[in-house]
Amino acid sequence: MSKKKGLSLEEKRTRMMEIFFDSKDVFQLKDIEKIAPKTKGIAPMTVKDVLQSLVDDNMVDCERVGTSNYYWAFPSKALNARKHKLEDLQKQDSQAKQRKVSLQKAIDKAKVGRQDTEERSCLLKELKALREERTQLQAELEKYRECDPQVIEEMRKSNAVAKDAVSRWTDNVFSIKSWTKKKFAFDDSRINKAFGIPEDFDYID
């Protein structure tokens, strides 16, 4: 045969509360220590600890009179305690819902200005094209580095023109970033991520 399973702490607490609710009387510890094992099956060695846990949770009242402690608990108090607990939980639920609404508004606000626009797409395409052109010019310059000086000079001029163009667009990008910062209070990393701008983006030396 399997060994009988003992009562859990919560089961012991529930049964001990039944002692108070059924009798609506006031007890001393020695009274509870006699009643609990006989009528509720609570192990004698655990009665004091279970009772103290109920006192600590304000479910059972305790008052010292002379040299003795007296314990009591009435259903009306338990009902009020449950009502207060329910009110606290409802308040927490309401606060959580308000917090959720507030966070959603913050998210919606943060999304403003991050939508893809035709202007943004054009700027990014032109910036990409200029970068590609700059890469090609640098490759050409390297290719003719040891060739005709006149060709090299022409390449340098072309490269200078491309560099000026890139600088102008770099100015435009920084202007857009500056406007975005003021308008939406975004930091650099957030703006870079939104517009696909590399973190090391800067003017060409």
Image: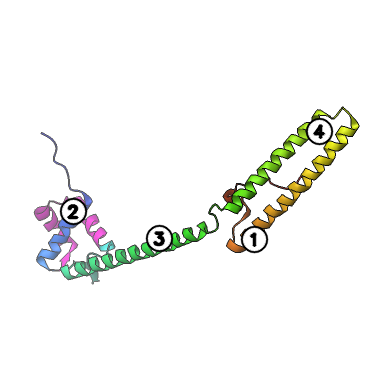
Given the image, on which type of amino acid does mark 4 rest? Answer: Leu
Q: Which residue is mark 2?
A: 12
Coordinates of residue 193 in the picture (x, y in percent): 58, 48
On the rendered structure, is 99 left or right of 71?
A: right
Query: Of marks 4 and 1, which one's residue comes earlier in the chain?
Result: 4
3 or 1: mark nearer the eye: 1
Q: Which residue is mark 3?
A: 100
Q: CA distance from mark 3 to mark 1?
A: 30 Å
3 or 4: mark nearer the eye: 4
Query: Of marks 2 and 1, which one's residue comes earlier in the chain?
Result: 2
> Is disc 2 in contact with disc 1, using a CB cutoff of under 8 Å?
no
Residue in view at x 55 percent, y 58 percent: 113
Coordinates of residue 177 in the picture (x, y in percent): 65, 56
Coordinates of residue 112 in the picture (x, y in percent): 52, 59
Q: Residues within 10 Å of mark 1 (few under 14, many from 20)?
A: few
Residue in view at x 77 percent, y 43 percent: 162
Query: Of marks 3 and 2, which one's residue comes earlier in the chain?
Result: 2
Segment colored magenta: 26-54
Q: CA distance from mark 4 to mark 2?
A: 89 Å
- Tell which of 189 and 134 is nearer to you: 134
Q: Which residue is mark 4?
A: 141
Q: CA distance from mark 3 to mark 2?
A: 39 Å
Q: CA distance from mark 3 to mark 4?
A: 59 Å
4 or 2: mark nearer the eye: 4
| Main secondary-structure element of the magenta-colored stretch | helix
